[in-house]
Image (spheres, rainbow, N blue to C red):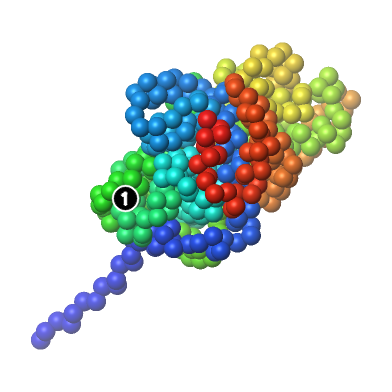
Amino acid sequence: MTAAPIHLPKAAADPSAELARFAAAVGFGDLSPAALRSVQASILDTLGVAVAGAARGTGQDKLAGLVLAAGGAGESSVIGHGARAPAWMAAMLNGAVARGVNFDDGHDEGSTHPSAIVVPAALAVAERKGKVDGRTLIVAVAVGNEIVSRLGRALARRPEGVPLDKWFLTSVLGVFGATAACCRILGLDAEATRNAFGIVLFEAAGTLEAFSPSGQTAMVRGVVGGFSARAAVMASLMAEAGITGVPDSFDGRFGLFPAFFDGRYDRKALLDGLGRDWALEDIGLKAWPTVRYASSYVDAARRIVEAHDVKPAEIEQIRVHVAGYAATRCEPLDRQRRPTNYNNAGHATPYLVAAMVARRRLTIEDLSDRLGDADVLDLAQKVVPVHDPAFGGDNRLGPAKVVIQTKDGRHLEQTLKHCYGDPQDPMSRDDLVAKFRSCLALRRTPIADIDGLLSMLTNLPGVADAGDLARRLA
């Protein structure tokens, strides 16, 4: 008797095929109104914070000196340094400064910062290619931001949730979105884009060590985004040159998901509705240059002092309710009350809350030039973390709870689910423009025509050569 044949279910195609088809096929008209607004805001925001990073970031000048001394074809502009470099090296420098002051946008569900990797890479390739119009740049950034957001979302929606114990997801996932954006700028088809994914897989890297207490002392903390932007440009140009990559970069035996995440992700969250339902609409902007885990606490404190006109001299204690990862931003407590450098300060919830209460603002200067100010350091000694399971764990943006106890016995409390800048409480256009202007004001050599830049960015779909943005910011 002949045994019946065994019919095994057909394996699902590697996601690289579908993501590559999306990257090559989606058009400007496919963007929802909200997606278009998000992408344009992210481009404006990213270029502003990149200028600030070039002026005030840690280690960027040393990296720029190394790259620019090597020379090479002046294909693309280096933001804030008045120079040009080969496209992949310009992308590295611009990606470094875009994350250099911790002020860039984020997709909170997936724990990623898409635009700081995608925008520098896409803009460097656009300038190298020449005469890439604003619509093409918008679509490219939309493609890149969507892929990064969906990759992060696919990990977040696993039963075990987003992995926060090992990998810096902005770097590990960002290379794929940025590569897709570059391929779109270059006009590559789906097959070539899939090859580019299969090339950049070998550059996907980045651990959370740069964000550990000791890692925050290192200059590399401020430049890690540059590695991913450089890798994306290189992979797309290699694919354009006809170099093939591994076909199964995501689900292959040693692809991204098996190698980094035990093969566990939500495929539907990654692929369903691709090109119709835009995950990038959930990208939020930062109103303050802080780690996202501290933003809600900063905002809750701001709302209390503004609503009740509380003066620092009136305060007995400030309690921040934290748990899980949010609690680590208060540990060790003495260090987080008295940060020693910019990278440390941006992660130090007690210091950040104290600075907001003392000054009713939180700027790049507050985390750099004014770290030794006695009024904030004294107030930070009154910030006490309260371990509360309701306000921590996987809540990367909220909820957050702050209680200010005054010397006259008042207990002023604010609980926030979403802080200002979240898509549920978006920044106003006026505040976004004000942030852009404040970032550009830090530049060593003033930009003569900020209004002209803002006009270009506001009317980006009608811009004939998007590379002009990089040249103006150089």
User: Residue 449 in the image: x percent, y percent?
Assistant: 65, 33
Residue at screen point 59% across, 28% down: 52
Quarter of the picture containing the N terminus is bottom left
Closer to us: 257 or 188: 188
User: Residue 315 in the image: x percent, y percent?
Assistant: 81, 23
Closer to us: 113 or 264: 113
Quadrant of res 351: top right
User: Residue 251 in the image: x percent, y percent?
Assistant: 33, 56
**Residue 107 visible to the viewer:** yes
Residue at screen point 28% across, 56% down: 247
Quadrant of res 364: top right
Residue at screen point 25% across, 49% down: 243
Secondary element under disc 1, as helix, strand or loop, is helix
User: Residue 459 in the image: x percent, y percent?
Assistant: 64, 49
Residue at screen point 35% across, 25% down: 71
Above/below status of 271 relative to 95:
below
User: Would you name the residue on which mark 1 appears?
Assistant: 240
Task: Say what amino acid the circle numbered 1 marks.
Answer: Glu
**Residue 265 visible to the viewer:** no
Closer to us: 154 or 57: 57
Quadrant of res 345: top right
